[in-house]
Image (cartoon, rainbow, N blue to C red):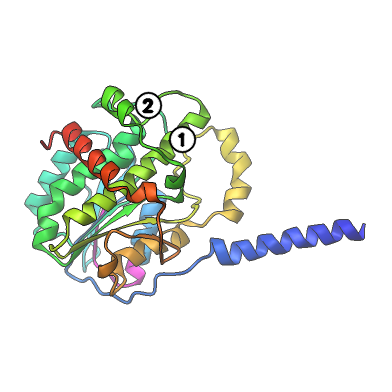
Amino acid sequence: MSVVLLVVGVVIGVAYIYRHIVVKGKRCTSKAKLHGKTVIVTGNSTFFFSTALLSLVLSLSYWFLSCEGTVEGCAVSLDGSSQVVFMQLDLGSLKSIRSFAESFLKSEPRLDILINNAGICLQGQTEDGFGLMFGVNHLGHFLLTNLLLDRLKECAPSRIINVSSMAHNFGKIDFDCLNSHKALGLGTSFIRLLQIYCDSKLCNALFNHELAKRLRGTQVTCYTLHPGAISSELGRNTGLFLQIVLKPITTFFFKNTVQGCQTTLHCALQEGIEPLSGRYFSNCTVRDLFAKARDDAAAKKLWEISERLCGLV
């Protein structure tokens, strides 16, 4: 009995330490004030609104863009009077992205920070025939960034944040599949679903790597990051039974949405990180990437394919 109690005590102790050190993590310490500046954030509702609310606590004036993956979305403007303005965007539609960018550029003279945060883990195709996770997680943000890039340069110093994941470490880019099927991979199994998600997160890291090279000398900087395992709505499309089974685990071992947006806020707001443009952050700390996530040739190739698929060339 004493051995069993000892084992239980060790397990509880390890879980407690994990929760309070790894799950809780560091917090963004920036005291930056952004009154009069404009920020766009793409994101799925819970994570997005936590970022928005925390920003208000920091007394910031923000523009926000929320995208529900492939169906609906809105942009929220929180100016000094907390006025909210809704705009629609579908990151799974090139037409919708172009329409949003056109409307935004006509109505807003500034863009100071662009946070490409939205992500899905779901099988299917976009309306343009791209693999769903490739189209939403990477290609939609690629096009949105390029359409807004001139405005970011005009308002420099400005920042672009590309939210990736540690899952990128398990990703790979099958360029033959991209060229022939406009998707990162084929197959419908759960394992293939996870693999393609990891591939899309590697795309985020490679996009950031190439973007940083192209932004040199512009005073526009970019960063990619792992926000941590977050109990958000990324898995909202999984079965109800699986959600119920996993709920106690995700509640205890995953970050809540306020904790999960800290590294994003760090990259968006922290003073003095401009020399780290192109780098990868986790837990509000710069980290080294594996070679495949900073491969110059792969990053350039992905950029060129993305340009072609988006109709930018």
- Tell me the SS state at disc 1: helix
Residue type beneath disc 1: Gln
At which x and y percent is residue 61? 24, 67
Residue type beneath disc 2: Gly
**Which one is nearer the viewer's eye here, 91 or 62?**
91
- How far is disc 2 from disc 1 in space, using C-alphas? 14 Å
- Sequence-first disc among 2 and 1: 2
- Residue at horizontal 31 percent and vertical 38 percent from the top: 136
Is there any visible trace of residue 73 in the rendered image? no
- Residue at horizontal 15 percent and vertical 65 percent from the top: 219
Q: Residue furthest bottom?
A: 31
Is there any visible trace of residue 4 in the rendered image? yes
Residue 69 sits in which quadrant? top left
**243 to 85, vertically: above or below:** above
Which residue is label 2 attached to?
Answer: 124
Residue 58 relative to residue 222: left or right: right
Q: Tag on residue 195?
A: 1
Q: Are marks 2 and 1 in contact (CB under 8 Å)?
A: no
Q: Identify the magenta region.
A: 55-65
**106 to 180, vertically: above or below:** below
Work out which quarter of the rendered image holds the N terminus and state it.
bottom right
- Tell me the SS state at disc 2: loop
- Residue at horizontal 33 percent and vertical 60 percent from the top: 279
Residue 17 relative to residue 310: left or right: right
